[in-house]
Amino acid sequence: MKYFLISIFSSLIYWNNIFAQPDFYKKEYTPEQIQEDFQTYKEVLSSLHPSLYWHTSKQALDSIWNLTESQLNQSLSKQEYFYLLSLATTKINCGHTGTNANLDKAFDQYVPLVFRYLGNELYLHRDLTTQNEPMKIIQSINGHSVEEILQSATHLQGTDGYISSPKPLFFNNPYRFSYRYQLLYDEPNYKIQFEDGSSILRNPISEDSLKKLYPFRINPLLEQDINSDTKIAKLTINTFDKYSYKSQKLKYKKAIKAFFKEVKAAKVSHLVIDLRNNGGGEDNYASFLYRYLTDQSFQYYESMETMPLPYPEEVREKVYLPVEVSNVLLRKFFIKKKGDRYFVKATPRTKGLRMQRPNADAFLGKVYFLISGTSFSAAAELAAFAKAYRPNTFFVGQETGGAMQGNTSGLSAYLTLKNTNISAYIPLIRYRMNIDNYELGRGVLPDYPVVATPNDILTDKDVEMDFVRQLIRQK
C-alpha cells in the first residue's frame, strides 16, 4: 500500500516536470475552477459507478483522490489537469471508465511512422515517408525512452483489473499513438533514435495525409472458412457490436446458424475461433455463440448490478443518462434486492441471466480460441466462460484484455465538466460472470503464449494460426 502511493506521487511529480515546457493549451484554469470540476467528478463517480472498489480498495482510492486534490492548489492548463484526472481514473482499474480531453484541431498532427511493439521492444515497422520497412529497435522518441512513453501513456487509459496486455497496443496504430503522444508532449517533430546508434527526423503530417499513406484498415465483421479436407473450420469474429452488423445489413445470428450447420455437415474435427481483434459489443451475441459450443444448459451471468436507484437528483442534473435508468423505466428493467443495491431483471433483452439451452448443431470437438489484449468486454467474457466450462478447449496468443470475473459496462453515463470541458464516461452495470475459478483482475491466460517476431511482421505471418495448425498436426 505504501509503495503503491509512492509510485502515484512520483508520477504526479514527473508530470509536473514535463510541463515546465510550453504546452498545447495556453489558457490556464484557476484553482477554484479545477477544484470545482474535481469535486463534481468525484460526486458523480461515487454515485453512479458500481465497481469503484472491485480492484482497488476504498482506502487506496481515497488516498489517490486526496493526493490528486493536493495538486489542485495552483493554476493548471487543461492538458495538465487532464493528465491528473486521467491518472487518478486509471487507478479504478476499469477498462470501460475513462476521460476525454475533447481536443481541438490544434492537435491535427500525426506521426508518419508505423510502430510495432513486440515482446518488450518497440520497432519501426514502416516509414510512411519513404515506405521503407526496416523493423529496427527504437531506443527513444525525442529523447523519451520507450518505457517512459509507455508508462505515461498508460496513465491516460485504464484497463480491467491488473491486465497489462492491452497497455502497449496503442504503439501499433499511428492514429492512437499520435493522439496519446500529443497529450503527453508538445514537440514540433519526431526524432527517432535507434538502438544501433542511427536516427531519423520526421515532421508530423495532417490526418488527411495520414489516411492517404496509411488508410484505416476495416476488418470484415465476421469471416468463415471450412476445409473439408483437413476437417478444420475457422470462425473469425471481429466485433459483437450489433450496430456494426445492422449498418452492413448482416444478420449475425443467421450467419452463426448457417456456419455451424456447415460445420456439422463437413464433419469438422477442429474449430478455431478468432477473437484477437474483437473489442466486444452485444453480450447476447457472445452467449448465443456459446450455445453452439456446448451440450449443457447454462446461465451466462450470475448477476447484473447497479447503484441505488433513482440516482440523486443533483447528480442526474449534471450527466447524460440512458432512458433505462430514468425514473419512468426503473420498474421495467430493475428489481430491488438486499440493501439498497438494484439488480437487472432477467428479460429477453438480458438473456445472459436466464438458463440457455445448447443448439442441436452445437460443435463438441476441439476448439482453439485465438486471443489477445484486444479481446475485450463481451469477447473476453466468452473466452472466460469457455475457459471455465468447456472441455477440449485451448487458448492461443496473449492474455485477454477483459477480466474473467466480469466487468462494468453496458449502459453508461456521460459527464462534461463545466469549467474545463473535459468529459468522462462512466459505466453503470456490473456484470458478474457465472463462474467460480478465476484470479481476480486477470483475463484468460493462453495455454500457448505466442509472440510474433520482427520477421513474422515483415512477411505478414499469422503466427497464432500457424501454431494452431502445427498443434493439430501433432495431435
Image (spheres, helix red, strand yellow):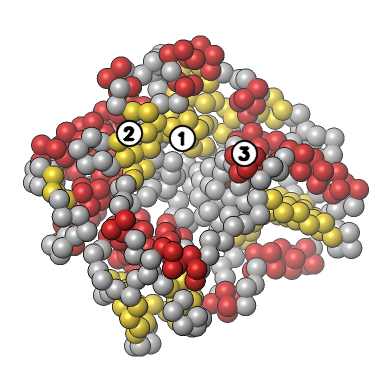
For marks 3 and 2, give the CA distance: 25 Å
Q: Which residue is mark 1?
A: 408
Tag shown at residue 242: 3
Residue 360's place in the image compared with 369, above or below, is above
Using the image, determine if residue 157 lies above or below residue 320: below
Element type at mark 2 = strand
Name the side, left or right, on which 327 lies relative to 390.
Answer: left
Rendered-image quadrant of the C terminus: bottom right
Q: Residue at horizontal 49%, vertical 71%?
A: 213
Q: In the image, residue 33 lies at what x, y percent?
A: 14, 37
Name the kind of residue labelled 2 in the image. Answer: Leu
Viewed as shown, does residue 228 lie left or right of 113? Answer: right
Which of 2 and 249 lies nearest the eye of the viewer? Answer: 249
Is 76 above or below relative to 194?
Answer: above
Residue tagged by mark 2?
415
Amino acid type at mark 3:
Lys
In the image: residue 104, left or right of residue 290? left
Which one is closest to the eye, mark 1 or mark 3? 3
Q: Residue at x 59, y 57 (%)?
A: 218
* Element assignment for label 1: strand
Secondary structure state at the residue bearing disc 3: helix
Q: Amino acid at mark 1?
A: Thr
Q: Are circles 2 and 1 on residues that touch, CB within 8 Å?
A: no
Residue at mark 1 to residue at mark 3: CA–CA distance? 19 Å
Say which label, 3 or 2, has the lower sequence index.
3
The N terminus lies in quadrant: top left
